[in-house]
């Protein structure tokens, strides 16, 4: 019999449906997940950053402000509806020129640019092959580039998270620190 916690916290493999993301993208979230505060020191003006699984753009739009006019944010998702919401939000913020939304597959991100910073917020657990995914991220990052991986503590067990951290290190990332992020398990990695 399956552990009841696995059912309660929906720990099976799945992709978060587009309609649920409204719960993650609202003014209340800014009380405990402040993008500028969380990403300070990770993103510089002129950077090319990658937001993997951006949802409706909660982090994407603030990152577009942080990279400035000479930088860009590549936002990749497997759901076109998510990207549609993100594009609308970027236009309203006057930042659409700095954001490149791209529809990707679960097998490959299809990115060829060199990246300065990668954010994967509450989405790595949705990827079918963690090892391949982490190796692809490493190949995209410039040497010394940073990767912030954040997973939901209520959804991803400590053991599951530690295994993903181990896979990131096997893929060629070094653990820099474990930032404290509300209701999350997180690690900031640097590409070796």
Image (cartoon, rainbow, N blue to C red):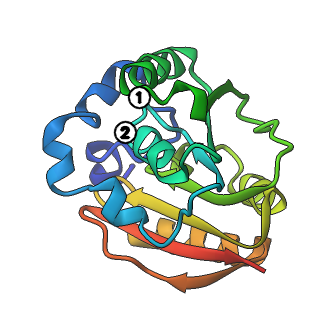
User: Considering depth in this image, is 31 or 80 the residue closer to the camera?
Assistant: 31
Q: Which mark is residue 56?
A: 1
Q: Are marks 2 and 1 in contact (CB under 8 Å)?
A: yes
Circle 2: element type = loop
Check the image and name the residue furthest to the front.
69
Q: Which sits in the foreground, 167 or 52?
A: 52
In the picture provided, is 185 more to the left or to the right than 79?
left
Q: Position of residue 135 (x, y in %)?
A: 80, 60
In this picture, residue 23 sits left or right of residue 11: left
Q: Pinpoint residue 119: horizontal percent, then vertical percent.
A: 54, 55
Asked if residue 112 lies left or right of residue 98, the reply is: right
Question: Eyeballing the image, is 6 above or below 37?
Answer: above
Q: Which quadrant of the figure contains the C terminus?
A: bottom right
- The disc at residue 58 is 2
Residue at screen point 51% across, 32% down: 15
Give me the residue at 70% from left, 34% from top: 106
Q: Which mark is residue 162?
A: none
Q: Is residue 139 above or below residue 101?
A: below
Res. 139 image quadrant = bottom right
Say left or right for 12 vs 113. Answer: left
């Amino acid at each position: 019999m399956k552990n009841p916690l696995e059912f309660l916290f929906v720990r099976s493999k799945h992709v978060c449906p587009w309609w649920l993301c409204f719960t993650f993208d609202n003014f209340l979230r800014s009380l405990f997940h402040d993008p500028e505060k969380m990403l300070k020191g990770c993103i510089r003006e002129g950077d090319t950053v990658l937001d993997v699984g951006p949802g409706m753009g909660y982090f994407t739009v603030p990152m577009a402000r942080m990279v400035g006019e000479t930088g860009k944010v590549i936002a990749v998702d497997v759901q076109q509806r998510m990207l549609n919401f993100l594009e609308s939000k970027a236009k309203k913020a006057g930042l659409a020129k700095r954001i490149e939304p791209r529809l990707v597959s679960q097998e490959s991100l299809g990115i060829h640019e060199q990246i300065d910073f990668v954010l994967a917020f509450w989405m790595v657990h949705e990827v079918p092959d963690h090892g391949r995914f982490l190796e692809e991220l490493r190949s995209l990052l410039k040497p010394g580039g940073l990767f912030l991986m954040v997973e939901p503590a209520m959804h991803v067990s400590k053991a599951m998270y530690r295994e993903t951290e181990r896979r990131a290190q096997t893929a060629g990332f070094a653990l820099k620190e474990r930032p404290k992020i509300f209701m999350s398990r997180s690690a900031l990695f640097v590409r070796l």
